[in-house]
Image (tube, rainbow, N blue to C red):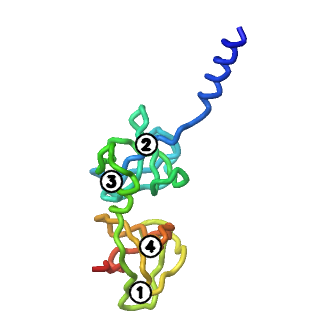
Amino acid sequence: MKKLLSITLLAILASFVTVDAQKYYGYVSDPDGYTNIRAAASNKAEILGDYTSGEYLYYTPLKNGWSKVYSDASSSSFMGYMHTSRIVRVKAQNEDVAGAYESAYEKGYIVDPDDDYVNVRKGPGTNYGIICRLAVSTDVLFEKTKSKWVKVYDLDGNYLGYVYRSRISQHL
């Protein structure tokens, strides 16, 4: 009886433990040009933001047709939920996620013909608030994407925000 009780208690406790699921790397593809990020895995859930078609992200598919989406490979970068049908995977399951992360970014530097700095914004557009400014010639990592606005990171990989793509020149 004690053994059965111990096994039952262990099974109950194990159901509360979550394992960090496999993350995949992909990009958004939506005929509307963007896809919403939601607070829950439902099209009726609150919209938290959106991703433009062509933007890259990490995701973990769920069994209900939705995916948890992340801004990078870490679990702490969880942003919300997106319908899996709007994500195109670019790496095979057996490939290293960290390697995909590195290949998704390029090194560049800030340029601006009119000012000594560029604005870094909270989101992809001038309607989003300014987080900080980066001086011209500052080295950055930026996301490989077809979007006009790109996510930028410092050289240590710390996320900074969005910069208009034409304000970044690629290192050759």
- Measured along the vertical axis of the image, is residue 103 above or below residue 90? below
Q: Residue at x 72, y 12 (%)?
A: 2
- On residue 137, the disc is 1
Residue type at the position of mark 2: Gln
Q: What residue type is labelled 1?
A: Ser
Name the kind of residue labelled 3 in the image.
Tyr
Mark 2 to mark 1 CA distance (whole Å): 37 Å
**Which percent across, then down, holds residue 29?**
29, 51
From this view, report whether residue 33 is shown above or below residue 131. above
User: Which residue is under mark 4?
Assistant: 126
Q: Distance between the residues labelled 2 and 3?
A: 16 Å
Judged by depth in the image, the label closer to the viewer, 4 or 1, is 1
Mark nearer the N terminus (2 vs 1): 2
Single out the mark in the foreground, 3 or 1.
1
Vertical placement of residue 139 versus 147, above or below = below
Q: Which residue is drawn at 30% across and 58% down?
A: 54
Earlier in the chain: of badge 3 and badge 1, it is 3
Q: Residue 22 carries which label?
A: 2
Considering the numbered disc 3 on the image, is that residue within a helix, a strand or a loop? Answer: strand
Task: Please name the residue that numbered disc 3 is placed on.
Answer: 27
Under mark 4, the amino acid is Thr
Q: Is mark 4 on a helix, strand or loop?
A: loop
**How far apart, in angstroms, are the residues tagged by discs 4 and 2?**
35 Å
Q: How far apart are marks 3 and 1 (CA)?
A: 29 Å
Q: Position of residue 82 (x, y in %)?
A: 42, 45
The image position of residue 51, as x and y in percent, is: 39, 56
Could you give the CA–CA distance between mark 4 and mark 3, rounded to whole angstroms?
23 Å
Q: Residue extending furthest front?
A: 3
Q: Do the residues labelled 4 and 3 touch (CB within 8 Å)?
A: no
